[in-house]
Image (spheres, rainbow, N blue to C red):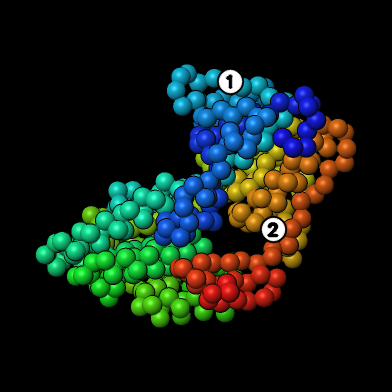
Amino acid sequence: QRKLRRNEAHITVVDPRNYMQYQPFLPETAAGSLEPRHVVVPLRKVLRRCRVLTGTVTGLDHARKVARVRPVEGPEQEIGYDVVVVAPGSVVRTLPIPGLAEHGIGFKSVAEAIYLRNHVLSRLDYAASVTDEARRRKALTFLFIGGGYAGTEAFAELEDMARYATRYYPNVEPEDMRWVLVEAAGRILPEVSVPMSEYTVRQLLKRDLDVRLGTRVESLAGGHVVLSDGEEFDAETIVWTAGVKAHPMLAHTDLPLDAKGRLTCSADLRVIGAEGAWSAGDCAAVPDLAAAEPGATTSPSAQHAVRQAKTLAANIVASLRNRPLADYRHKHVGSVASLGLYRGVAEVYGIKLRGLPA
């Protein structure tokens, strides 16, 4: 929108929501550290020279250069184009675990973050009024599955929020709650170094939180949790944050996909073998030119997505003007993880920070 000359091109943006959300701030949104309105951007407010269409792309016929779009209301329609940017991102990756579909809470949208906050507080309300000890214990048991950024941050932020909230419940103490984080791998936060990951676990354990590494969930049927280490318990709050996968909409296109279902792209963000098609973000397999290992692709993170977007925009404008394209190259600058209000870990440009500075 900013780089194009007036009437040089017309841009149509199709999205199921009329806003963009900043994914890394969902844990703070769930904990109430940030207002929901501070992590979303209304599309029509910032894309004033674009046509914004609220709807779902159900398929793409790039051979005819036509997208099939289902609006919020009304019949499906076809939209023709000359250039297409396919960037639907990722969706939650689930596993066939009994009870997950019925009891699992996702953590991929602002709506889910707000729901989770309200749900956790409602369990404190319930526990404060119920007399049956077994039902009370189940209400105050919170299980998070997946120890990546989303899981660890949501786990730490929400526990911090709930611990603070117990001061308003005379008969609910922080010690009455049980918070369990389950991770199938041998460590959490794989994006940071091993010492920082181990430090994070130590900090969580100091808060009397239960961190299970090298452990899988085998069943969640009826809210009864069965872990691979043999332990069983009941929980009314089960949060699933065990990874993402490329958006399944890509399977309804005639564009080339890799083994993970992502669009195969060149370093300049063009979809390989599809003239006029571009991609970026979680759904794009973009060569990581800064990586040491050959054949590596960029990780699905905001750090890459926001930078790829700038290169993508510049390259599309350059292609319209028959100018050379630039390759996307970015060296990972580090990571930051929030562990509650005024607490966190950070590893940025080789500098390691803990606690309040992080």
Which numbered mark, 1 or 2, is in the foreground of this view?
1
Which residue position holds label 2? 296
Q: Is the residue marked by circle 1 packed among few (<14), some (14-19), or many (20+) residues within 10 Å?
A: some
Residue 50: give x, y in percent of width and height: 65, 29
Left or right for 159, reference 127: right
Closer to us: 179 or 294 = 179
State whether residue 209 appears in this view: yes
The amino acid marked with disc number 2 is Ala
Q: Is the residue marked by circle 2 packed among few (<14), some (14-19), or many (20+) residues within 10 Å?
A: some
> Label 1, label 2: how many angstroms apart (C-alpha)?
36 Å
Residue depicted at 70% across the width and 49% down the height: 308
**Disc 2 element:** loop
Left or right for 252, reference 269: left
Q: Which image quadrant is residue 146 in?
A: bottom left
Left or right for 19, reference 351: left
- The correct choice, above or below, for 199 with respect to 239 in the image is below
Residue depicted at 50% across the width and 25% down the height: 70
State whether residue 224 appears in this view: no
Closer to us: 158 or 254 = 158
Closer to us: 38 or 151 = 38
Residue situated furthest right in the rendering: 323
Residue depicted at 39% across the width and 72% down the height: 212
Residue 237: give x, y in percent of width and height: 30, 58
Residue 82: give x, y in percent of width and height: 72, 25
Q: Kindly identify which numbered label has been placed on residue 78.
A: 1
Q: Quadrant of the N terminus?
A: top right
**Disc 1 element:** strand
Of the two numbered discs 1 and 2 on the same chain, state the one appearing first in sequence.
Answer: 1
